[in-house]
Amino acid sequence: MALKINLCIQNFLRALPRARATDSVTSPSVSYACKANPSFSANAEALKEVQGSVEKLELLKQKIEHVGIDCVDLCTVGQYNNVYCPKCRGGQSKERSLSLHINQDGDFAMWRCFQVSCGWAGQAFADINKIGQYNSQGQMTEDSLELEPLGEKLITYFGKRMISEDTLRRNAVVQSSHDQAVIAFPYRQNEVLVGCKFRTIEKRFWQAKGTERWLYGLDDIDEAAEIIIVEGEVDKLSMEEAGFRNCVSVPAGAPQKVSTKRVPYPEKDTAFQYLQNCKKYLEKVSRIILATDGDPPGQALAEELARRLGKER
């Protein structure tokens, strides 16, 4: 950014045939130069634009630092940066668990702590008229979700789909009983519960409050060089029955069709946020097999995933 400013200033001064470098931009000589040399006006506008960007980024930086996030000066704009979380300081491992992203324009920032016992997240805007949002999520537990072992009815249901009790047990598939017993698919990262998705036999779905968007079965692809991505939790269990444990499922349904627009920036790509959340797992994978459904939405999901993960893989 500093280099860009300096170049604009140099061009700005070269365009002053009758002005001195010490003249202010409102002096008569500068006004004369604008009329005499059209490129002067263009350079002046470029300088003004860059200065505006710097001021905007500085304001955003102040807002980020105000909530306790350090190392803003070391962050790269347009990329995800790992810094220390001011809430948990990286937990027992003392790792840089907070992922901070400042968009390319320097007017928006978002962050999330990936320590499962913390989960602090928020966003900030350079625009003084926009208010940032912050939240802190406590650790989710089986007790808080009132989960219990699968009953005979649901075990029989899975058995008819050729999914064994061993596979159900290894994936910690359980149930939640209120008006009726419903299937509960716990989402885990490093064996810690980070979310839960519920499903009735009639295929009605919902998620536990506070569930983050992750791939289902994430621990099964840790350190894997080749993985399979399927469209649902039951598909992931079926893949395991077929001998493939290196499989994960997307947490949400498939789009109706492939978007004709460019892939959004990560901070705006809300429908596929789970890919960014699982980035540290996915970036180590050299080959990805997309085994989505064969219907139009399933094929659209495969195409959207390929656009984001890289078709070369």
Image (cartoon, grey):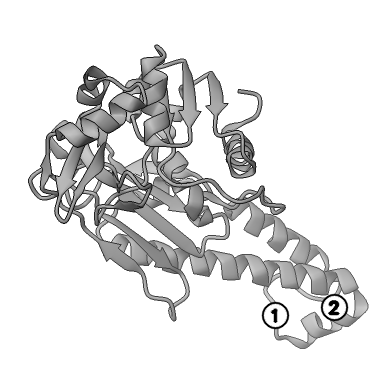
Would residue 284 be found to the left or right of residue 291 on screen? left
Question: Furthest-left residue in view?
Answer: 143
SS label for mark 1 = loop
Contact (CB < 8 A) between labels 2 and 1?
no
Q: Is residue 188 above or below residue 108?
A: above
Q: Quadrant of residue 194 in the image?
A: top left
Q: Amino acid at mark 2?
A: Ala
Question: Furthest-right residue in view?
Answer: 36
**Can residue 27 be seen at all in this image of the molecule?**
yes
Q: Residue drawn 16% across and 56% down?
A: 179
Q: Quadrant of residue 250 in the image?
A: top left
Residue 33: numbered disc: 2
Relative image position of residue 49 (x, y in whole percent) = 66, 69
Image quarter in which the C terminus is found: top right
SS label for mark 2 = helix
Relative image position of residue 60 (x, y in whole percent) = 43, 65
Q: Which residue is mark 1?
A: 25
**Can residue 16 be seen at all in this image of the molecule?**
no
